[in-house]
Image (spheres, rainbow, N blue to C red):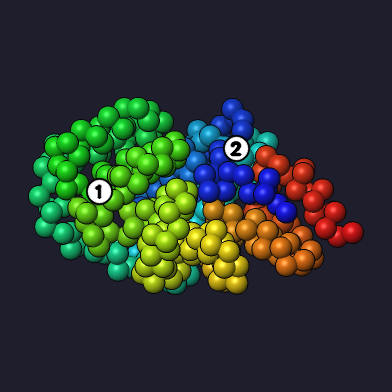
Amino acid sequence: MLRYLLLAVLVVAALAGESQYELSGRFTPEGRASVSLFGVASPFLATTLSEDGRFSFKKLEPGAYTVAVFIPGRGEARQTVEVGPGGADSHGRISVTLTLKESDFVVADVLRRQHSIPASQLAVPERAVREYEDAQRDLAKRDVDSAVKRLEHAVEIAPEFSAAWNHLGTIAYQTRKFPRAEECFRAALRADPGAYEPLVNLGGVLVNLHKLDEAWKYNVYAVLTRPNDALANSQLGMTYFEQGQLDLAEKHFVEARRIDGAHFSHPQLFLAEIHLRRGQRHEAAGDLEDFLRHHPDWPQAAKMRQTITDLGR
């Protein structure tokens, strides 16, 4: 079994190391866009504007990040990028090209947030919005404590502020405070029942808390809402995996890998475990090889390569 290789999957660990890197990227088709970078394993957020499809983020700690590209009129597309020595040149620069298909863009929920904000969110006082915006700037500086204080103040001012609750939940999740994360995501959904981010985030934290029946409901709804979301598919796969429904788990892990092969939920590791349980050693080795292609800096890469060799015997 590969249980030791599944460590830090439900809670993704940051890559070790003190070096900082520069992520230089471009997306096609080129266009004017807002590009945001979200930390996966630790709270971080940075945003820049792109006029020609190119973007850059400097002084990044190693780890997995989500790149979100928002193009007016098209919507938002997200992909995972790993920052670390395996993909960097001698100057610590990492170059990526994101080839975005029309099916990668989410339109409905993004446009809903942009143009049809629920009345409860329109009522959020300006000073709560300022606290939220200042918290985002704190996260860009990795001042997590200050960001949390500002977000908590924002929801004290405006308990109906769904985005602030969701941010608080995300930080709690990343710092492994799962019960608090659950509270915050539920509060975000109560404030805005149509919001997608707290919906899929709640589905994830419920898997971690092993509340599988409830996790199934949220993750199924997330997949139905956004069938091309790698996170939603992977979390539904995790739910089925924990329930012992391996055929259904495999279906959704395969879909998550298709959508985003580098996704931070690591669907390949679960697929390898499923194939091993079935005695499919060759398929399991292929899953692990695919995983290492996307994650060359995985802390247990050497052990994984030995496992691949052993599976070929």
**Callout 1: SS:** helix
Q: Is residue 145 left or right of residue 113?
A: right
As drawn, the label of residue 15 is 2
Image quadrant where residue 94 sits: top right
Image quadrant where residue 86 sits: top right
As drawn, the label of residue 304 is none
Count all numbered tags in the image, as a single digit.
Answer: 2
Q: CA distance from mark 2 to mark 1?
A: 31 Å
* Residue at x 34% of width, y 58% of height: 199
Q: Could one spot residue 92 in this view of the protein?
A: yes
Q: Is residue 268 above or below residue 81?
A: below
Going from the N terminus, do you reach mark 2 or mark 1 first?
2
User: In this orientation, which residue lies closer to the viewer: 154 or 84?
Assistant: 154
**Residue position for label 1:** 187
* Residue at x 85% of width, y 54% of height: 310
User: In this orientation, which residue lies closer to the viewer: 258 or 68?
Assistant: 258
Quadrant where the C terminus sits is bottom right
